[in-house]
Image: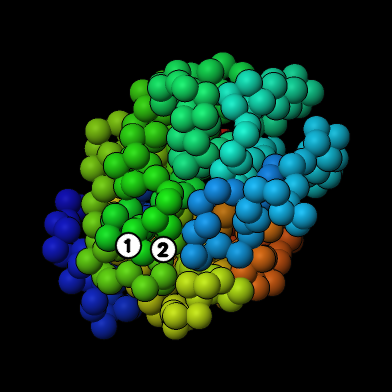
Amino acid sequence: MGITQQQALDWLGSDDLLGLGMAAQAVRNQKTDARVATYQIDRNINYTNFCTEYCSFCAFYRPMGSKEGYLRTLPEIYEKIDEMLALGGTGILLQGGLHADLKIEWYEDLLRALHSRYPQVHLHCFSAPEIINIAELSGLSLRDTIARLRDAGLASIPGGGAEILDDEVRHRISRLKCTSDEWEQVHRTAHALGLRTTATMMFGCGEELRHRANHLERVRRLQEETGGFTAFIPWIFAPENTSLGRKQSETTAVDYLKTLAVSRLYLDNIDHIQTSWLTPGIKVCQVGLQFGADDVGSILIEENVVYAAGVRNRTNEAELRRIISDAGYIPAQRDTLYRSYVLKN
């Protein structure tokens, strides 16, 4: 479609919600199977909650040395994967805080152990800030760090840590975390090394609409360069129990759906757009299937980060299949890279 950044900004500020939804749906039907909406069964595993970044939007992290901090053992992680497999799952999303002591060898040992024990499980692991932290602690370049993680079993990289890819916002909400350019460089390097990644956007954290447009432009530009993003996942900031949340008003469902639709329109070089149930809720997630999204994400067997921020939404495979069917689509279970799916009526 080739819309401009100014058009995206105008649409984000538009009152024509239904018009945007219809336009986004037309793009969605051109990009993916118009009959099908997908979901995944995987598990988020947070291997540690120790973190050195102190982001104002996060209620999950604990400072180094905290009695409430943890570092998961291999047997604990194995147990979580076994539970995921029993539910028909195919992958894990392994993420943690930025630990001050864990170098590349610890992550290599972890990945090798998981890949050896569960060769069928897709290891979708480590956000850009984590990878930068590993590289800095280990005295390695980004390229060498990602290559070594890949060789140890890393299969793809999640888009976490993006928040808003505009340093004016990042300085306010997460000033110790990586810059927008650094986040982008991790994904560019991963794509060059043959790894697919996802892109995310956490909005509703006090940013202006121009910041959202800047974020979308960065993602679209990088996708034009590399083609390495499988999907884009916009989601709403969860304000409860966070220092930032005390200063913000909650994002409305209308704002969420509008941003979802504009994401589909602007990122016409990314095949898949995910509608979220975790922070907006199941009903808004379902409506998102009429606003350009073709995927409802994962059942999220375990989710700790936004749970710590007060979000209590939960779901299961049967409910995700139901909301897809009720929205007029055929439910299909997919894998992490959208390479295959199983139709389920």
Q: Amino acid at mark 2?
A: Ile
Q: Are marks 2 and 1 in contact (CB under 8 Å)?
A: yes
Q: Nearer the viewer, residue 22 or 270?
A: 270
Q: Residues within 10 Å of mark 2 (few under 14, many from 20)?
A: many
Which mark is drawn over residue 293? Answer: none
Number of numbered callouts drawn: 2
- The picture places residue 267, in percent across and down from the top left corner, at 30, 51
Q: Nearer the viewer, residue 131 or 333?
A: 131
Q: Nearer the viewer, residue 17 or 226?
A: 226
Horizontal side of 216 relative to 250 (left or right) equals left
Q: Secondary structure at mark 1?
A: helix
Q: Which residue is mark 1?
A: 169
Distance from disc 2 to disc 1, alpha carbons, whole Å, reads 6 Å
Q: Is residue 219 above or below residue 138?
A: below
- The picture places residue 12, in percent across and down from the top left corner, at 26, 71
Q: Is residue 91 visible?
A: yes
Q: Is residue 313 above or below residue 27?
A: below
**Residue for point 45% across, 35% down:** 132
Q: Image quadrant for the C terminus?
A: bottom right
- The picture places residue 34, in percent across and down from the top left corner, at 44, 54
Q: Residues within 10 Å of mark 1 (few under 14, many from 20)?
A: some
Horizontal side of 68 relative to 168 (left or right) equals right
- The picture places residue 194, in percent across and down from the top left corner, at 43, 22
Q: Answer with the quarter of the image where residue 26 lies.
A: bottom left
**Residue for point 48% across, 28% down:** 135
Q: Nearer the viewer, residue 78 or 83?
A: 78
Q: Amino acid at mark 1?
A: Val
Q: Which residue is mark 2?
A: 173
